[in-house]
Image (spheres, helix red, strand yellow):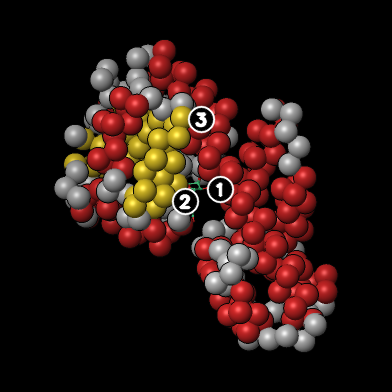
Amino acid sequence: MNIGFIGLGIMGRPMAKNLLKAGHKLVVYDKFAPLDDVVAAGAAAGSSNRDTASKSDLVITMLPNSPHVKEAILGKDGVLEGIKPGSIVVDMSSIAPAASQEVGAALKAKGIPFLDAPVSGGEPKAVDGTLAIMVGGDQATFDKVKPVLDKLGASVILVGGVGAGNTTKLANQIIVALNIAAVSEAFVLSTKAGVNPQAVFDAIKGGLAGSTVMNAKIPMILEGNFKPGFRIDLHIKDLQNALDTAHSLNVPIPLTASVMETLQALKADGDGPSDHSAIAKHYEKLAKIQVRK
Ligand code: NAD
């Protein structure tokens, strides 16, 4: 199976390399980022999204947000113009579910099956090939593509029709953002009350308050290390998609709206490029104390 891989950013680059390591033939393309190291690892270089699609049985995209995916697939010189009958498109970007459905419908009109398959786990799991992949689409297309996705992820789950993958990813991003905010608020309080934050972490991590988020982010907060990881700017993008989706369904999500304003305040302070563990800095500023070792 020839695979076209579009979008060689923080996530796409190691994912493409894992597919090469697994023995797949790859054509790669990125509108802005260099292709050299992936070509050196064995991929062919595409000259546009259209050209890449024309040489592929399966096209995978890993792009920032809905407008980029729509441009790359539906736009001029895009995937839709080049794709061959019988090929499949899988978008692994985190975008609005409505945008996934729009792209899926345009491809379906040309007889091309589509899956939305966003991921959780960040760069380390993209490198290890152990991402959590949540997929929207039909069972038959999922079954055809799953052996390829298994090379990228430790868990690959079909959650529903097209758009359901990104709806699941929005749920994931709400839970992660609110969890970091809750951890930040709690640790600022306990630190200001005079209790050692490392001791608080050790005491509660095995109980009901323990979480993968707390295990990953408290060590960073205690070190004052806010190097990304997952950038505040990207989490703003995801929470905006969550708010838009919720409001289109008449669902109020007040806690998400509140954390969104925290992220906006951090962005205004120059922390857009920081890791989302920097949510703690906002609470530290409010209470005039730092949660450090
Ligand atoms: P990134 O910005 O590093 O990479 C995106 C790439 O897409 C860039 O190299 C850019 O040049 C390319 N691009 C943009 N528009 C294009 C177009 N029209 N045609 C071709 N290429 C184009 O982003 P990333 O961190 O790799 O994230 C990709 C997606 O994965 C995002 O939706 C993000 O939310 C999601 N995600 C990221 C992480 C993470 O930790 N970084 C974790 C989980 C999910």
In the image, residue 125 sits, relative to residue 83, either above or below, namely below
**Residue 268 placed where, x, y %?**
75, 59
Give how far across and how far down residue 164 sits, in percent: 50, 32
Q: Is residue 121 above or below residue 88?
A: below
Name which of mark 2 and mark 3 comes first in the sequence: 2
Instruction: Answer yes or no: disc 3 within 8 Å of ligand 1.
Output: no
Quarter of the image for the C terminus: give it.
Answer: bottom right
119, above or below 121, in the image: above
Seen at 71% across and 74% down, the residue is: 187
Does the CB distance between marks 2 and 3 fall below 8 Å?
Answer: no
On screen, residue 47 versus residue 275, left or right, reads left
Q: Amino acid at mark 3?
A: Gly
Identity of the residue furthest to the left in this view:
23
Q: Quadrant of residue 57?
A: top left
In the rendering, at what x and y percent does residue 158 appear? 40, 35
Find numbered disc 2 in the image and state the secondary structure of the residue it sits on: strand
Q: Check disc 2 and report the residue beneath it.
A: 120
Mark found first going from the N terminus, 2 or 1: 2
The amino acid marked with disc number 2 is Ser
Residue assigned mark 1: 172
Dividing the picture into quadrants, the one containing residue 259 is bottom right
Within 8 Å of ligand 1, the CB of disc 2? yes
**88 and 210: which one is in front?**
210
Q: Are marks 2 and 1 in contact (CB under 8 Å)?
A: yes
For the point 19% across and 34% down, the residue is: 1
Image mark for residue 163:
3
Where disc 3 sits, the SS reads loop
